[in-house]
Each structure stands twice: as C-alpha cells, then as structure tokens.
Image: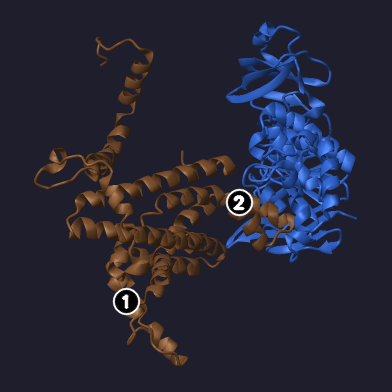
Amino acid sequence: MADKNLPTDGRFTRLFDHFKREWQIYAMLLPTIVWFIVFLYKPMYGLQIAFKDYSIFRGVAGSPWIGIEHFQTLFGNDQFLRAVSNTIKISALNLLFGFPAPIILALMFNEILHATYKRTAQTIVYLPHFISSVIIAGIVITAFSPTLGIVNIILGWFGLDSIYFLTQPQWFRPIFVGTGIWQEAGFGSIVFLAAIAGVNPSLYESAVVDGANRWQMMWKITIPSILPTILIMLIIRIGNVMEVSFELVILLYQPATYETADVVNTWIYRQGLQSGQYDLAAAGGLFNAVVAFVLVMTANTLSRRFSRTSLW
Amino acid sequence: MSGVNLSGIVKSYGAVQVVHGIDLDVAEKEFVVLVGPSGCGKSTTLRMIAGLEEITAGDLTIDDKRMNRIAPKDRDVAMVFQNYALYPHLNVADNMAFGLRIRKMPKAEIQTTIADVAEILGLTDYLERRPADLSGGQRQRVAMGRAIVRHPKVFLFDEPLSNLDAKLRTQMRAEIKRLHNRLGVTSVYVTHDQVEAMTLADRIVVMNDGRIEQIGTPMELFNDPANIFVAGFLGSPPMNMVNGVLTKNSAKIGATEVKLNGALANHVGREVVVGIRPEHVTLKASAKTSPLPITMDLVEPLGSEALLHARFGKQEMVFKAETKGDIAPLWNVDKVHVTTDLVKLFDAQTGQALNLRG
C-alpha cells in the first residue's frame, strides 16, 4: 500500500513501485550489500589512522592528527620503496606472462576436438586452483629443494650443481610468477572458454567455406571475438597490480630473498601486525589503494577510447 | 558445366538417418529452392553441398567433379547464412574481403572487386561501417556481397531472409532474383517460406522428413502437386482437403456431390481425398462448377479480395472471393461453386495424386 503522505513526485512513486514489484531481487542482493558495507566500507573509517599518531589505547577517534607524516616516513623508507619496486616488477612479469597464459590455454582447449581428452586436460589444469596456497608453497619448496627437489635432480642428470633456488634473490620472481601461472592459468581460462563458446558458430562455418584454416580462424575470428573479454579482464588485472599474491609471497620468501621478494603487502604485514605500527601500515595500504584506483581508471578510459570496451 | 548433382545422398547422425537418399540435378545457372517444414533435411542437404556436413552415403558432384571428400574451400561454393555470419569486429569492406585475403588475392584486385560488388549491392557508402551499425537489410546485402566477391561456381543460401521483417523480405527477395538474373550463377536456396520458393525458384524441391516429395517449376507444383503434402504445403492459404468417395461422375463428400469430368467409371467406390484450392471457387454457378454448401464463420478482408473461413459439415475450409469494395454481402454466402476442372484428387491411403480424368 502506498503511503498517502508520500510526496506525489512521479519519479519517487515509480521508484517505490519498482522496489515493491522487484523486492525479491533486492532481497537477494542484500547479503552482498551487507558484506560490502561490513568488510569494505566500514573499515574505510579506519583509514584515517594513516594521518594520525594512532594508539590502540586512544582508539581511532582519540588519536591525534599528524597530517602526512607517515607518508613522508614511507617515502623516506628504503625498504618500502624496495617493496614498491618489487611489487611493480613482479606485477609486470605477471602481466606479461601470467595474463596471456589462460588466454593461450583457452585457445588451445578450443582446438582440442576429442571431448574426453579435452575434459581430462581441463580438469588437470583446473586442479591447482583448488589447492591451498600453503600446499602449493610446500610443493614448490619441495620441487626446488637442493637435495630432493625434482628440479635439482634433473639439473644433476646434466652434470650441473644443485642450486638452492629459494634462497637466491634472482630466482624468486621466476619461481613466484611460474607458480602463479601453474596455480591459476587453468582456472583463469574458464572465463575465456566461456567467451569463446559465445562466438557465433556460423562465423567459423563461413570462414571454412571461405577457405580459412584453423590457425587463421583462431587469429581472425576467435581472438577478435573474445577481445572485449580480454580487455575487461586486463582492466581488472591492472586494478590488482599492487595486490601481488600476498599469501604465496609470505610462504615462499625469506629474509635472504627480501631484496626481490618483499612486496608492499608483505611490508605492510610486517609493519602493521609484527611491529604494531598500524598507522604506518595503513598509510602503505592507502598508497596501494590510490595507485590501484588510478591504474584501473586509466586502463578503463584507454580501453573505452580505443576499443569501445570498458568496465563502466 | 557448373551444375550440382546429388545422387543417393544420405545423412545419418549415429543410428538416426535424417536424409534418406536424395537425387537431385541442379543445372548450370539454375536457381533451385529447397523448401519444406522445419526438420525436413533441407538445411542439412545444403550443408552437405557446402561441405559443412559429411555425406554418409551417395555422391555429390559439382562441375562434374566428385566432392564428397573435398574440403569446403576447394568446392568453389559461397554460402549466405541465415544470421548473416558477419564478423562483428570487421567493417563492411573487410568482411567482404575476408575470403579474398584468405585466398591471397592481390590487394589492388581485392579493392576493385569490393568496389564493384559494393556498387551492385548499393553498399558503397557503408564500406567503412561495422555490422552493428547496419540495418538488417544492409547486413544481408553484405553477406551476399561476401559471397559474390568470390565469384564462385555455386551460391548456397541458407534461409537468408528469415531474420528480416515482411516488407524487407519482399524487397530483398526481388534483389536476390535480380542478382541471379544478372550474375547467372548456379544457386541452391533453402527456405521454409513457400512464397520465397514460388517467387525465386526456377525449380522447387519440396522436402519432407528427409525425402524429396516433388521437384518441378513453381507452377507445375502448384497446378499438379504429386501428393497431399505438396498440395498442402504450397499455396496460401493451403488447399482444402476433404475425404470423399468416387461415383461415376463425381466425388461424393458427405451428402454433397462435386461433379467431376472424365472417366471415373472404373473407380466407383474408391476412397479419395478431394483437394480444392481456396481460389478455385466462385460465388456464381456456371456449367463448369459444382456447388458446395457452407456455413460462414468469418470474413477476413484483404483489400481487393477476402478470405472466407467457412464450415463444410464439421470441416473448416478457407476460400478466396472478390470483395468488390464491400465485404458485407460475403457474410451471407451459403454456398461456393467449385471449379470442377481444378479439383485435385488424391488416394486416401497413399496420399498420392490421382489422375483419373484422362
């Protein structure tokens, strides 16, 4: 029943009618909205400690404002700057090798005609995604172990000396990026496979009649057809550039490899939780978020301008 | 000879046979339309000609060469698809050039060919546009353009007009016919629309349940349908069918006798299906007609003529009558006069046409 006291504004009435009619849909949306508010928006209140001399005893509101002092500390801190540099380098490698991997995998799956073989191969590459990062790290540590690791055993077959990969800074990034690809490329290919499944089959039939082979069809039909999906995924990926897989870094790095392995998130973890400098850590986190925001906005604008595809 | 020959063509999916041995000769420059209801095997047959479906048994020859194992690209056919199959990321010119580039035609030659065909199809102003920026009719023209630029031996059309609205369909139908007259390329065209079939075809192939029911020119099929299926499929509204029994000089349907000419003496008592086309009746009696009492249900005015929906006994029938500017008198019609020469007879058991009148 519409309230008689409601203003007779047509727009408001329409909105009210809309909610009344579609309330079930909004009811289903509610848990997600609550989740966002509780876990993402409410914590934003605490971001102010990045500009305060925070004390857990005085609380967020009671701590005194100190302006941008923490940011000055951050940018004068060699370890933080190293973490920023490492984050960018690892993300760049991830983007360069990790982003195309699921696309290539999806294109390859698309070319497999034998249904059983295709399903089996897909299951095998999806599996690592469902394994806990702790176990993944365990497998990697074992595989690269200097004594029992399969990698060093193989090196031994060729008469090469064992390498303690995980203690040498120069090996961390290749191992980390490679592990990420192994763990996520298969699962990541699902979205591209779905995009490929959406390509009109008569485009391929038309191309077959025109004389195109499978390679030409892949380059001239499949890839251009899934390009909007690729761009959307790229924008999302760019938005997460500063969010290098924190768990896996924590599990794989050690002080000996901090030089190449320590990223912003692990630095924040050490400062915030291990050293109790919550305000400085919050400043680091805010810096991360601002960079990610700028990147995703830029990528979205460029994508919209050049390819008519964008997230919003 | 760029003809197409199908001999005993069979298509099976596993144990299920969907096309049961088709024999068809399409002459050079001929425009043949495969028509039939959904699932009758017409598109499958076309796709077998294109090479998009494997032929289970039988022989397909194009230009006197056996094509069963030849790849689609080497059959020298071009196909126009129902949903146009235009590449959404390419503009009109690139869509039309796709097949030519694949075949490594020199760039200059591609440009000339595209310009020529665009001119023919009225697409010159749209060459830079993408399919999403075109109307349905323009997209259809691009799809045809892509086929034409290849200069193939055979054009294959798979229900190319079914996504267009009625007005555009009529317009494009005429364009296809004009194009065929101009280019003279052997064409096989699939449709479920009998009007398209009648207007476009040099010959129509009526298919049903994976078999050919009849092959002939549009007027042959219309005037002399081989069986009840063809008689009911071609013509709009379809032919009225009513069960009857032959007497010495008539077909008795219920209590009514429809006079028939010809020697029926040897067939007295034979059960038949009497076919009366809606337009083969008049409202005035003459020496060449036989009356049929009806009860009028509905009069649908179409302008110069009207559709009379009437009941003959319990059977619903549709007839056509001239309106002469006023449909009110048509509501009072209580009998139509069947032109006896044009009545069709079919065997009640087999459904095959009977020619008993010499």
A168 or A230, nearer to the observer? A168
What amino acid is at disc 1?
A: Ile
* Residue in the image at 22% along x and 42% along y: A66
* Residue in the image at 38% along x and 84% along y: A163
Who comes first in sequence, dot 2 or dot 1? 1
Q: Disc 1 sits on a residue from what chain?
A: A
Q: What is the CA distance from the residue labelled 2 to the residue labelled 1?
A: 40 Å
Q: Disc 2 sits on a residue from what chain?
A: A
Q: Name the residue under label 2.
A: A224
* Residue in the image at 70% along x and 16% along y: B302
Q: Judging from the image, what secondary structure is the residue with disc 2 in?
A: helix
Q: Mark 1 points at which residue?
A: A141
Q: Are marks 2 and 1 in contact (CB under 8 Å)?
A: no
Vertical position of residue B203 compared to residue A75: above or below: above
B310 or B286, nearer to the observer? B310
B73 or B162, nearer to the observer? B73
Q: The blue chain is which one?
A: B
Q: How many labels does the image show?
A: 2
What amino acid is at disc 2?
A: Pro
Q: Judging from the image, what secondary structure is the residue with disc 1 in?
A: helix
Q: Please tell me the colour of chain A.
A: brown
Residue B27 in view in this figure = yes
Residue farthest along the left direction in this orientation: A57
Q: Quadrant of residue B116?
A: top right
* Residue in the image at 30% along x and 11% along y: A7
Residue A266 falls left or right of residue B36: left
The spot of residue A144 in percent (x, y) is 36, 80
Residue B255 in view in this figure = no
